[in-house]
Image: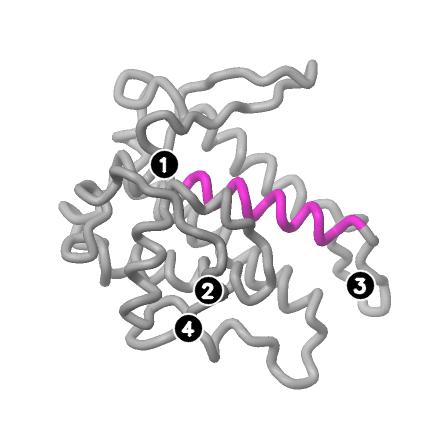
Amino acid sequence: VRGSFQTLVQVPRYVDQNEWLVLNVFEFYQYLNLFYGAISEFVTPQTCPTMNAGPGIDYTWIDSNKKQVHLPANTYIDLVLTWISNKFDDTTLFPTKQGVPFPPHFLGVLKSIYRQMFRIFAHIYHNHFDKFVHLSMEAHWNSFFAHFISFGKEFDLLDKKEMEPLLPLIEAMEAQGKIMMVDHKATSSSSNYGNTLSPNNAIA
């Protein structure tokens, strides 16, 4: 996709905003599943013993005992994708019948889904982006990410702290007009991700 995603993310006229949110987040989930499937053979306990997004950023999983546990990236991602699938299959959370309202807490669940999907993006960009380059898929992956972030910004689905692992990339895409600009009152944290997230090799 060339240009900005700004017009693509806005709610079309006569479309319910909640339905628009669910439709798009579900499609992001489906595409993320497909992209991950293309490189999943490289995400092993040996190559990725933790679910990380660069030095010092490790994501933990909450187990059945409500304890934080460190897992290999492939295990973490598989659990996330299964968890998201189960959420979308829950018709009490995401009703499929006309006239049935969304529950009050559905937006909070949607934000949790979005946060977990972002973590998969962050892990892949920091550890496996070269695989997409090798497969000549980097332009598609970057366009997908730009759409994902643009949508998240439009509907406030991600907070800035969560986006910190990929802020240099996001800000570079904003500067290129790939992602719509937002309020930058908060100061971006400094980082050492420039080598792996250079606009020269990571922007479609």
Residue type at mark 3? Lys
Check if mark 1's residue and mark 4's residue have beta carbons within 8 Å: no
When asked about the image quadrant of residue 144, the answer is bottom left
**Quarter of the picture holding the N terminus:** bottom left
166 relative to 14 in the view: left or right: left
**Quarter of the picture holding the C terminus:** bottom left
Extent of the magenta region: 105-120
115 falls in the magenta region: yes
Residue at figure coordinates x 63%, y 15% from the top left: 67
2 relative to 80 in the view: left or right: left
Q: Earlier in the sequence, mark 4 or mark 2?
A: 4
Check if mark 4's residue and mark 2's residue have beta carbons within 8 Å: yes
List the residue tagged with mark 1: 123
Residue at figure coordinates x 24%, y 47% from the top left: 197
- State the SS at label 4: loop
Q: Using a 10 Å C-alpha cutoff, classify the residue at mark 3 as few (fewer than 14 neighbours), some (14 to 19) or many (20 or more).
A: few
Q: Using a 10 Å C-alpha cutoff, classify the residue at mark 2 as few (fewer than 14 neighbours), some (14 to 19) or many (20 or more).
A: many
When asked about the image quadrant of residue 40, the answer is top left
Q: Earlier in the sequence, mark 1 or mark 3?
A: 3
- State the SS at label 3: loop
Residue type at mark 4? Phe
Q: Position of residue 85 (x, y in %)?
A: 59, 42
List the residue tagged with mark 3: 97
List the residue tagged with mark 2: 150
Q: Using a 10 Å C-alpha cutoff, classify the residue at mark 1 as few (fewer than 14 neighbours), some (14 to 19) or many (20 or more).
A: many
Q: Earlier in the sequence, mark 1 or mark 2?
A: 1
Q: Earlier in the sequence, mark 1 or mark 4?
A: 4
Check if mark 2's residue and mark 3's residue have beta carbons within 8 Å: no
158 falls in the magenta region: no
- The residue lying toward the viewer, choosing from 84 and 49, is 49
